[in-house]
């Protein structure tokens, strides 16, 4: 008796998925961050940096506000680089641009004039397109070792009201 019910539910789901009841064009929010993945820690590792990521990683999707946010934190070590803060900033920028498939507004790597040895550094990356706004905030805090820094990266993506 239960088998026909499960079969009907599965058939209804399949019919809905393949019958054109889904939106023709996904928002940039759905395309970029709920599938292809912006992952700055993976980008650090690809560049050969040592990453000690926090075990605590938070994020949420708010269907009412139509937004998504996620944060990363940890310590990254860039050996053999005299300007590690700028290098890390550029990796985050390039990873966002890769995930977007576009160029973001850069108020992070362009802030190099505010970069002072031994001092925290922060900036942002922003992108508005396809009915969504993506904002990434980056904080870099120096550690005892000159080539190590703590990082906090916060991404918020929201579909704009129609």
Image (cartoon, grey):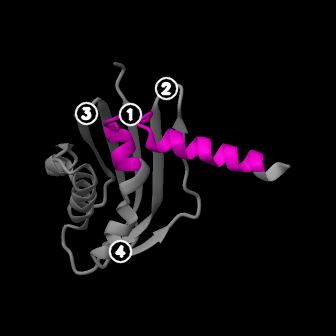
Measure the alpha-carbon separation of dots 2 and 1: 19 Å
Q: How packed is label 3: few (under 14 Cα within 10 Å), some, or many (20 or more)? A: few
Q: Of 57 and 123, which appears nearest the observer? A: 57
Magenta stretch: dominant secondary structure: helix
Front: mark 2 or 4:
2
Mark 4 vs 1, N-terminal side: 1
Front: mark 3 or 4:
3
Q: Secondary structure at mark 1?
A: loop
Query: Is residue 103 visible to the viewer in this orientation of the structure?
Result: yes
Q: Secondary structure at mark 2?
A: loop
The residue wearing badge 3 is 130
Front: mark 4 or 1:
1
Q: Is residue 16 left or right of residue 94?
A: right
Q: Is residue 157 magenta?
A: no
Mark 1 vs 3, N-terminal side: 1
Mark 2 vs 1, N-terminal side: 1
The residue wearing badge 1 is 23
Q: Is residue 7 left or right of residue 24?
A: right
Measure the alpha-carbon separation of dots 4 and 1: 36 Å
In the rendering, which numbered label is found on residue 65?
2
Quadrant in the rendering for residue 104: top left
Q: Residue furthest top?
A: 162
The residue wearing badge 4 is 45
Q: What residue is shown at x 27% (from left), y 58% (from top)?
A: 95
The stretch of residues the image draws in magenta is 4-33
Q: Of 52 and 84, which appears nearest the observer? A: 52
């Amino acid at each position: 008796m239960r088998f026909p019910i499960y079969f009907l539910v599965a058939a209804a789901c399949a019919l809905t998925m393949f019958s054109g009841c889904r939106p023709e064009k996904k928002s940039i929010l759905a395309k970029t961050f709920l599938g292809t993945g912006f992952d700055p820690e993976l980008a650090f590792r690809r560049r050969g940096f040592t990453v000690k990521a926090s075990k605590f990683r938070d994020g949420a999707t708010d269907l009412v506000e139509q937004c998504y946010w996620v944060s990363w934190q940890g310590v990254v070590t860039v050996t053999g680089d005299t300007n590690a803060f700028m290098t890390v900033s550029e990796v985050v920028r390039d990873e966002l641009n890769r995930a977007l498939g576009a160029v973001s507004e850069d108020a992070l790597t362009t802030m190099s004039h505010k970069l002072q040895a031994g001092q925290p550094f922060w900036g942002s990356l922003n992108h508005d397109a396809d009915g969504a706004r993506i904002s990434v905030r980056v904080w870099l805090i120096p550690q005892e070792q000159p080539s190590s820094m703590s990082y906090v990266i916060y991404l918020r993506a929201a579909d704009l009201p129609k």
